[in-house]
């Protein structure tokens, strides 16, 4: 009898552990609605959503990378570089010196070029990691410096401000990505669309299954016929694309591109993924979890600002929450292993 | 009081059992270790020799039973504690640090230091002294990774001799990678050690060696004690009889097929695989495979068995030679292409190469064949479900729910999932590398039933096995490898334990 009770206790504990990020989110919401005035309002919610959109999108790409057992430290720098390229194309156009002409692109074209740039940088990351067997941490650390450097070189460190475009050049409308549609921030809408697309890609396609298999056991995946290198490269391409999209939204929200935009955002993205239950060891993670994780960080950030907590204390608390999340993650893993063993012994 | 050590016995194990999930590795074993003697432990793969030694060395703890040293009962919770009692072990797989020099390897975790400062002069001098005593004056600053395997073995021994209190030294197949000359040096050292009163436990598969060096033999079979005797009272045939037992063997199946008339599905010619650093892993190996045939590949460790599979599956692009599939020469590029062409591989190491531990049972099963169940990239869950269910049923995998984690299954059922994964790709040729390793007898029989069932349906199968009885009962034909060379091809009644063993040593001449 006692084993029955024990196993049902385990099942309850498991359910609570699995939903822990969501529970934390609810607790935070309750906490801040008591401590901060006007916290529980539509306006606050939309403001948090606007902020969360930025690292939420980064965290989607990061989740893919981490599930394969990798890491992408270059995402923040790609945000900066993407914003600078887009801003430059709006303000200065593209000058082809050998023809003596300057080309100006329409906003959709600029968006396309920026995304393509993100994809190419991601592909380079993936190629360095797979073809030259460089550890993802190192390869993307290198790319982080390169991309950040290029962002500064592009404008000699200056900011492209007032990104409105010019009627004469037909490149107006950049502000759209930072605006609101029916009161909802466009960034938040993009986050939701991308989250749905990438959640479906991860759960329902063979590609998604291959991503999980590589993180779970790369050798077994290879021997099962999974094209490991191809999948890994694609994962970094996805992360690069997400970063470029964030570059676009960030520069539009600020109506300016600054080369330092996105500095240390990779850490927020990693934190969101980990809070959402993505395992740094690879093989485990969901897009839904990551989005909840991103909102936990967003609520902590904005909630503490509204409570008047100093920025320095915000950092301390954020750090503690992240480490605590991973400790609980270990609890879950141990419990899971215990339950698997129990199931095995019972079946005998 | 009866269970304490007898006269002349320095260590006594009483009623030791060890239960792993899925198998009972040791079953109520009693074992006496004679003082100052070479105590030999013999048994087939999986007989429980290494497991028993791990208990004595503190690497693992018995599920049941007691250990006595002298007159006191001992419990070792780890190797450090066993070492305190003077018990050292040299592993089958070397446990050295290839990135560190010889003297650091020898003194690892027993450093002499004054305050924080390490006395490296002492470490080097002592290392030099011990190695000279072992007749292997290896420069103590050499990186262990740069040494030959035989030399590394000496470093392992030297580590155990650093402290003077050594009472028991366990050697788990120390000669498997040594040259004949090195073996003789090792034997001389062993004699010196026993003369000092040190007791040695010696595990080996090489029966001639046992007769030469051993004093007392204990035989295990399927985790149980079988017999023990002084070496002077016994001979090799007696040992073989005790090891293999009588009566117990898998039934030899009868197939009335005229293999000469069967079409060849696979033909391998002049397969050669160079070894990094000179020599060959495979040298000019020829063989073929007929439709519906079960071809066995037998050989000792390092004979080149697994390498044949790796060449065929496209994992060894540096190989030379030709492979023909249905008479057509293949251009082997990658493993995913080979799977598309109709090959399926069940790798040797289930945990490291066969399973994705983070995925559930069903996903593991469909991983290789998932392309067949996708439309425009999207998985057809209904079809995937049906195929996995039918495969689970077909090969009798015992699962309560296929969405449970893969590790919730017993070893035997895990292995069946890996086999099912290969079968789901509808292969023409199935390659099985040690398919029965680490699973219990019942599951073994079931795995063989699956192999036979699919061969009857016309699937061509190659099975690598290092267990004689298995390969004899299952294979229609056996290719024997030794040192990368094909040294025998046996059919029908030629497939006997003696012929196989004989052929598997042939390639070692002129070593």
Image (cartoon, coloured by chain):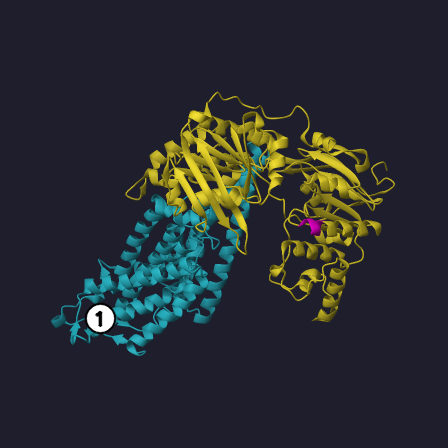
* Front residue (pair B102, A232): B102
> Residue at coordinates 24% horizontally, 72% vertically from top-left?
A88
Q: Secondary structure at mark 1?
A: helix
User: To which quarter of the image does residue A39 belong?
Assistant: bottom left
Q: Residue furthest right?
A: B7
Chain identifier matching the cyan colour in the rendered picture: A
- For residue B181: magenta? yes
Location of the N terminus of chain B by quadrant is top right
* Front residue (pair B286, A70): B286
Q: Residue furthest left?
A: A168
* Front residue (pair B60, A317): B60
Dominant secondary-structure state across the stretch colored magenta: helix
Q: Is residue A195 left or right of residue A293?
A: left
Specify whether residue A40 is in view: no
- For residue A98: magenta? no
> Residue at coordinates 61% horizontally, 40% vertically from top-left?
B506
Instruction: Give how far across and how far down residue A318 sits, in percent.
Output: 46, 63
Per the rendered image, the range of residues in magenta is: B179-183
Q: Is residue B218 left or right of residue B270?
A: right
Q: Residue furthest front?
A: B510
Residue designated by label 1: A89
Name the colour assigned to chain B in the rendering.
yellow
Instruction: Give how far across and how far down residue B40 sits, in percent.
Output: 75, 41
């Amino acid at each position: 009898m006692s084993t029955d009770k024990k196993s049902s206790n385990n099942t309850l504990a498991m359910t609570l552990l699995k939903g822990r990020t969501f529970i934390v989110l609810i607790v935070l919401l309750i906490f801040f609605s008591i401590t901060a005035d006007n916290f529980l309002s539509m306006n606050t919610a939309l403001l948090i959503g606007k902020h969360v959109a930025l690292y939420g999108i980064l965290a989607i790409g990061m989740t893919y990378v981490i599930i394969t057992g990798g890491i992408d430290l270059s995402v923040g720098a790609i945000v900066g570089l993407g914003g600078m390229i887009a801003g430059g194309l709006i303000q200065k156009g593209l000058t082809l010196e050998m023809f003596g002409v300057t080309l100006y692109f329409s906003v959709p074209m600029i968006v396309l070029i920026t995304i393509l740039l993100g994809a190419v940088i991601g592909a380079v990351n993936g190629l360095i990691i797979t073809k030259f067997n460089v550890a993802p941490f190192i390869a993307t650390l290198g790319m982080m410096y390169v991309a950040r450097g290029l962002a500064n070189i592009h404008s000699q460190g200056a900011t492209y401000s007032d990104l409105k475009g010019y009627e004469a050049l037909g490149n107006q409308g950049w502000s759209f990505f930072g605006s609101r549609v029916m009161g909802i921030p466009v960034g938040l809408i993009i986050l939701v669309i991308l989250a749905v697309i990438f959640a479906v890609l991860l759960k329902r396609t063979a590609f998604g299954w291959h991503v999980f298999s590589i993180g779970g056991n790369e050798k077994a995946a290879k021997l099962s016929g999974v094209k490991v290198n191809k999948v890994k490269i694609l994962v970094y391409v996805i992360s690069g694309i997400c970063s470029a999209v964030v570059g676009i939204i960030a520069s539009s929200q600020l109506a300016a591109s600054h080369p330092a935009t996105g500095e240390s955002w990779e850490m927020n993205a990693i934190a969101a993924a980990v809070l959402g239950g993505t395992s740094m060891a690879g093989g485990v993670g969901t897009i839904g979890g990551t989005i909840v994780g991103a909102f936990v960080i967003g609520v902590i950030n904005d909630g503490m600002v509204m409570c008047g907590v100093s920025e320095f204390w915000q950092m301390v608390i954020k750090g503690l929450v992240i480490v605590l999340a991973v400790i609980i993650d270990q609890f879950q893993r141990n419990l899971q292993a215990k339950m698997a063993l129990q199931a095995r012994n019972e079946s005998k | 009081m009866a269970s304490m050590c007898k006269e002349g016995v320095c260590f006594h194990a009483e009623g030791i059992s060890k239960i792993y999930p899925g198998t009972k590795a040791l079953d109520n074993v009693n074992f006496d270790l004679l003082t100052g003697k070479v105590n030999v432990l013999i048994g087939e793969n999986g007989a429980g020799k290494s497991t028993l030694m791990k208990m004595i060395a503190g690497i693992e703890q018995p599920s049941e039973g007691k250990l006595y040293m002298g007159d006191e009962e001992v419990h070792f919770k780890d190797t450090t504690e066993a070492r305190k009692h003077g018990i050292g072990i040299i592993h089958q797989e070397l446990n050295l640090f290839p990135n560190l020099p010889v003297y650091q390897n020898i003194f690892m975790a027993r450093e002499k230091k004054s305050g924080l400062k390490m006395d490296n002069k002492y470490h080097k001098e002592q290392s030099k002294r011990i190695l000279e005593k072992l007749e292997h004056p290896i420069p103590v600053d050499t990186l262990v990774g740069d040494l030959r395997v035989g030399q590394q073995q000496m470093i392992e021994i030297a580590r155990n001799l650093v402290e003077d209190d050594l009472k028991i030294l366990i050697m788990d197949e120390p000669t498997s990678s040594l040259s004949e000359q090195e073996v003789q040096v090792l034997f001389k050292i062993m004699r010196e050690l026993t003369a000092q009163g040190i007791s040695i436990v010696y595990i080996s598969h090489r029966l001639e060696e046992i007769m030469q060096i051993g004093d007392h033999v204990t035989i295990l079979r399927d985790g149980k004690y079988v017999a023990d005797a002084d070496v002077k009272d016994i001979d090799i045939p007696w040992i073989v009889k005790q090891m293999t037992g009588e009566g117990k063997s898998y039934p030899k199946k009868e197939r009335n097929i005229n293999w000469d008339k069967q079409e060849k599905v696979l033909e391998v010619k002049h397969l050669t695989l160079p070894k990094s650093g000179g020599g060959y892993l495979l040298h000019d190996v020829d063989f073929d495979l007929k439709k519906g045939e079960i071809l066995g590949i037998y050989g000792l460790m390092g004979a080149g068995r697994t390498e044949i599979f790796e060449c065929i599956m496209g994992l060894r692009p540096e190989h030379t030679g030709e492979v023909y599939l249905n008479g057509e020469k293949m251009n082997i590029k990658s493993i995913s292409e080979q799977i598309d062409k109709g090959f399926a591989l069940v790798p040797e190491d289930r945990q490291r190469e066969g399973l994705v531990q983070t995925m559930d049972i069903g996903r593991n099963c469909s991983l290789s064949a998932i392309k067949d169940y996708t439309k425009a990239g999207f998985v057809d869950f209904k079809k995937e479900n049906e195929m996995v269910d039918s495969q689970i049923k077909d090969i009798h995998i015992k699962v309560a729910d296929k969405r449970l984690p893969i590790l919730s299954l017993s070893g035997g059922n895990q292995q069946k999932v890996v086999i099912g994964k290969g079968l789901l790709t509808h292969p023409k040729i199935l390659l099985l590398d040690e398919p029965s390793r680490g699973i219990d007898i019942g599951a073994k029989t079931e795995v063989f039933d699956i192999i036979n069932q699919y061969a009857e349906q016309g699937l061509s199968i190659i099975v690598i096995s290092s267990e004689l009885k298995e390969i004899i009962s299952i294979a229609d034909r056996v290719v024997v490898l030794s040192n990368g060379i094909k040294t025998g091809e046996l059919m029908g009644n030629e497939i006997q334990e003696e012929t196989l063993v004989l052929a598997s040593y042939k390639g070692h001449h002129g070593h």
